């Protein structure tokens, strides 16, 4: 996406002080596929666990969803929509059989996290991301952000869970 | 395991102030199967993520291992053995296919965390648990502790990873 004079860059300092984002809202003519340009939120690896999952197929990963303090509070209180400032981080790792574990269990049953694959974020800002349910989407491959074209499908895939504020992952007790 | 006059019960207040354990060392004649009696460490669900895994077979779960601050520091610095006060928490949930997710992906590939199954802890206290590599082991089913007999096999299963201070789980970046 080309930069235009309409593009605003803001630095948002989140509650907690550790996370910074530069946010670039979409052009008016790309309302359904905005450029969710922000950096990896600092400290995300320290956030609390929401839940875990396994995706088969091409993804073939184990994943964990973490939330910043605002997101975790919202989950635990069962309050929707998530307030502005909520951020969800989806970590994922290759799905690797553990021969070490299998030996102990006495059978082939154990799969553990291998190398990291990519990281995805959902950032709630109901004004900036009004066109996409109030959520900005991002993915980083080896620390490098996926461009706007690569993120254009994020929102549409999340629409089926609009009733849960576009978030698939449920809190695991 | 029967209680004897040799049994000591101590209350250990862990660094951070939130976790309390009552610890009952083993009888002299049960050095390899001590009674690791302690309560669920308060606040464990807020601890940081170490890694995730999937166990097939009878377990059929998705799991996450969390660590308290002492454990996380040790992992990230790559320092072994874990210092006294380190605690690892293994959470697990039933392995449930997600029809909701599968619809979005367009195929049967997504498995998410269902109900919690049980919680396990490893607590490092090199003096109290000297007979078992410095680790105390516990499991809670629906909040109820598994008795000493049910924990008697924990240590033996962890011996194959003695070189990693008896801990299977590796840190997922």
Image (tube, coloured by chain):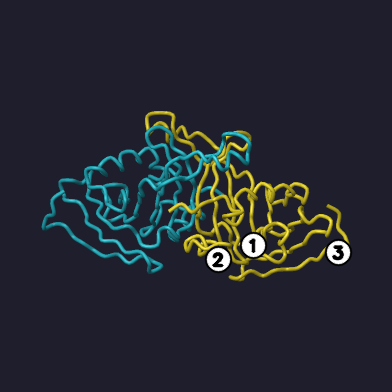
Chain colours: A cyan, B yellow
**Dot 3: chain letter:** B
Query: Which quarter of the figure has residue A22?
Result: bottom left
Judging by the rendered image, the residue that carries numbered circle 1 is: B124
Answer whether labels 2 and 1 touch (C-beta < 8 Å): yes
Mark 2 and mark 1 lie on one chain; the one further toward the N terminus is 2
Relative to A108, say whether A131 is above or below: below
Q: CA distance from mark 2 to mark 1?
A: 10 Å
Q: CA distance from mark 1 to mark 3?
A: 22 Å
Question: Looking at the picture, how far across and down is residue B89, in whole percent?
Answer: 59, 55
B16, B81: nearer the viewer: B81
Secondary structure at numbered mark 3? loop
The label shown at residue B70 is 2
Question: Looking at the picture, how far across and down is residue B100, in whole percent?
Answer: 44, 34
Judging by the rendered image, the residue that carries numbered circle 3 is: B6
Relative to A134, say whether B19 is above or below: below
> Could you confirm whether marks 2 and 1 are on the same chain?
yes
**Dot 1: chain letter:** B
> Could you confirm whether marks 3 and 2 are on the same chain?
yes
Secondary structure at numbered mark 1? strand
The answer to whether residue A114 is left or right of residue B155 is left
**Dot 2: chain letter:** B
Number of marks in the rendered image:
3
The answer to whether residue A150 is left or right of residue B141 is left
The answer to whether residue B57 is left or right of residue B6 is left
Would you call the spot at circle 2 few (<14 residues within 10 Å), some (14-19), or many (20 or more)? Answer: some
Question: Looking at the picture, how far across and down is residue A114, in whole percent?
Answer: 44, 45
Q: Residue at x 32, y 67 (%)?
A: A13
Q: CA distance from mark 3 to mark 2?
A: 31 Å
The answer to whether residue A124 is left or right of residue B89 is left
């Amino acid at each position: 996406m080309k930069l235009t004079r309409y593009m605003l860059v803001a630095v948002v300092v989140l509650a907690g002080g550790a996370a910074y984002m530069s946010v670039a809202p979409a052009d008016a003519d790309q309302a359904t596929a905005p450029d969710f340009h922000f950096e990896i939120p600092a400290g995300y690896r320290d956030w609390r666990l929401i839940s875990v999952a396994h995706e088969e197929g091409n993804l073939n990963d184990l994943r964990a969803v973490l939330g910043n303090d605002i997101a975790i509070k919202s989950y635990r209180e069962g309050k929707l929509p998530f307030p502005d400032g909520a951020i969800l981080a989806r970590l994922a790792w290759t799905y690797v059989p553990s021969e070490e574990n299998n030996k102990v269990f006495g059978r082939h049953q154990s799969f553990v996290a291998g190398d990291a694959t990519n990281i995805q974020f959902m950032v709630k800002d109901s004004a900036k991301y009004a066109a996409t349910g109030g959520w900005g989407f991002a993915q980083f491959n080896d620390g490098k952000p996926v461009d706007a074209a690569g993120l254009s499908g994020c929102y549409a895939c999340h629409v089926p869970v609009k009733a849960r504020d576009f978030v698939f992952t449920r809190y695991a007790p």
